[in-house]
Amino acid sequence: QVQLVESGGGLVQAGASLRVSCTASGGTGCISVMAWYRQAPGKERELVASIATGGITNYADSVKGRVTISRDRAKNTLSLQIDNVKAEDTAVYYCFSNGPLVACRSWGQGTQVTVSS
C-alpha cells in the first residue's frame, strides 16, 4: 500500500548539482529500506544508492563520491543529491521501497534527469 512519487528531475548542466526527491505515503512505517534506481535509454535499470533503517547507506561505484542519499522518516521523504552531474547520469530515476510485507514494496513512477553539456 506504500505509494511513492518522485520529483525534482529536469534538465541540468554538466558539472552542476541536482536533487531528486521522493514522497512516500500509505503505511510508510513498514519500510525497512529505500533506494534510488535509474535507467538510461537502452540500458538496464541499475541501483544508484540505498539506505536502510539504521541509516546505513550504499552507493554504486559509478556515483560514489558524487551522490548522497538521505531519508527523513518523519516527513516520509527520500532524497538523492547528485553533485558534478555527468552525461552518463542522464536517466529516469526511480524511487523504491521494500520491507517485510508485500505492501511495503513499491516503485515510484520515475522522474527524468537529463544532463546537458
Image (tube, grey):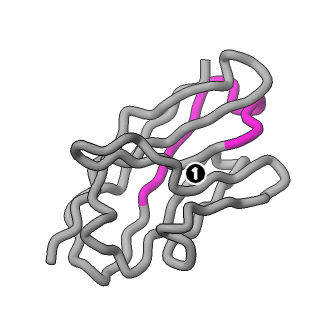
Give the mark count: 1
Residue shown at the point (45%, 34%) measured from the top left = 108
Q: Nearer the viewer, residue 50 or 23?
A: 50
- Report x, y in % for residue 39: 35, 45
Q: Quadrant of the C terminus?
A: bottom left
Of the residues shown, which amino acid type is indicated by label 1? Leu
Instruction: Tell whether 19 sits left or right of 35.
Output: left
Q: Nearer the viewer, residue 107 or 59?
A: 59
Q: Is residue 78 a member of the stretch shown in magenta?
A: no
Q: Is residue 21 a member of the stretch shown in magenta?
A: yes
Q: In which quarter of the image is the N terminus?
A: top right
Instruction: Tell whether 96 sits left or right of 19.
Output: right
Residue 5, image quadrant: top left
Residue segment shown in magenta: 20-33
Residue shown at the point (31%, 55%) measured from the top left = 9
> Which residue, as the protein is rendered here, is positioned at the far left?
117
Residue 86, image quadrant: bottom left
- Report x, y in % for residue 40: 29, 49
58 versus 43 height, above or below: below
1 versus 83 height, above or below: above
- Report x, y in % for residue 106: 56, 27
Residue shown at the point (76%, 32%) measured from the top left = 29
72 versus 12 height, above or below: above
Residue shown at the point (59%, 47%) measured from the top left = 35
Mark 1 = which residue?
78
95 versus 103 height, above or below: below
SS assignment at label 1 = strand
- Report x, y in % for residue 20: 42, 57
Instruction: Tell whether 30 sits left or right of 36.
Output: right
